[in-house]
Amino acid sequence: MKKLLFICSQNRLRSPTAEAVFSEYEGLEVDSAGLDREAEIPLSSEAIQWADIIFVMEKSHKNKLSNKFNLWLKGKRVVCLDIPDEYEYMEPALVELLKIKVLPLLGTF
C-alpha cells in the first residue's frame, strides 16, 4: 500500500482533486492538505510522516514545504508536478494532467 500526499496552497482545488482521483486506485492510500494557514485542511507534520511520496503542485510549494517542515522531510520523496493554479475542482483537464504526471511515478499503474 503506497501512501500519497498531495499538497497545494489552499487545499480547495488541485490537491483535493488529486486525492479524489487517486483514492479510486487499489493499493493507494491518499490524502491532501494545504500549505497556507487558511487552507481547508492545513498541512501537519503527522501527514508528512504518514506519506511515502509527497506531491506538490508548484516549485513555490516545495520551497515553502522545506522551510516549514524540513525536520520531517528527511528521507521523504517530494515530487513537484508543475501544475499551475488555473483549474477548477475535478476539471477534466486537471484530472487528465494529474494522471499523466503521477501514474508513471508509481510504477505498477
Image (spheres, rainbow, N blue to C red):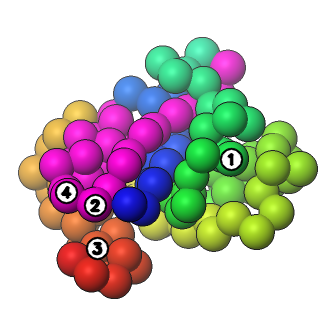
Q: Secondary structure at mark 2?
A: loop
The answer to whether any part of residue 57 appears in the image is no
Query: Residue shown at 23%/66% (left/top)?
Result: 99
Q: Looking at the picture, does residue 84 appear above or below residue 46? A: below
Q: Choose the circle earlier in sequence order: 3 or 2.
A: 2
Spot occupied by residue 106 in the image (x, y as percentages of width and height): 36, 76
Q: Secondary structure at mark 4?
A: loop
For the N terminus, the image quarter is bottom left
Spot occupied by residue 59 in the image (x, y as percentages of width and height): 63, 61
Residue bearing the label numbered 3: 103
Residue bearing the label numbered 2: 27
Residue bearing the label numbered 4: 25
Magenta residues, start to end: 13-37
For the C terminus, the image quarter is bottom left
- Cα separation between marks 4 and 2: 6 Å
Q: Looking at the picture, does residue 93 appear above or below residue 35? A: below
Q: Nearer the viewer, mark 3 or mark 4?
A: 4
Q: Residues within 10 Å of mark 1 (few under 14, many from 20)?
A: few
84 magenta-colored: no
Q: Choose the circle earlier in sequence order: 3 or 4.
A: 4
Q: Choose the circle earlier in sequence order: 1 or 4.
A: 4
- Cα separation between marks 1 and 4: 22 Å
- Cα separation between marks 3 and 4: 10 Å
- Cα separation between marks 3 and 2: 13 Å
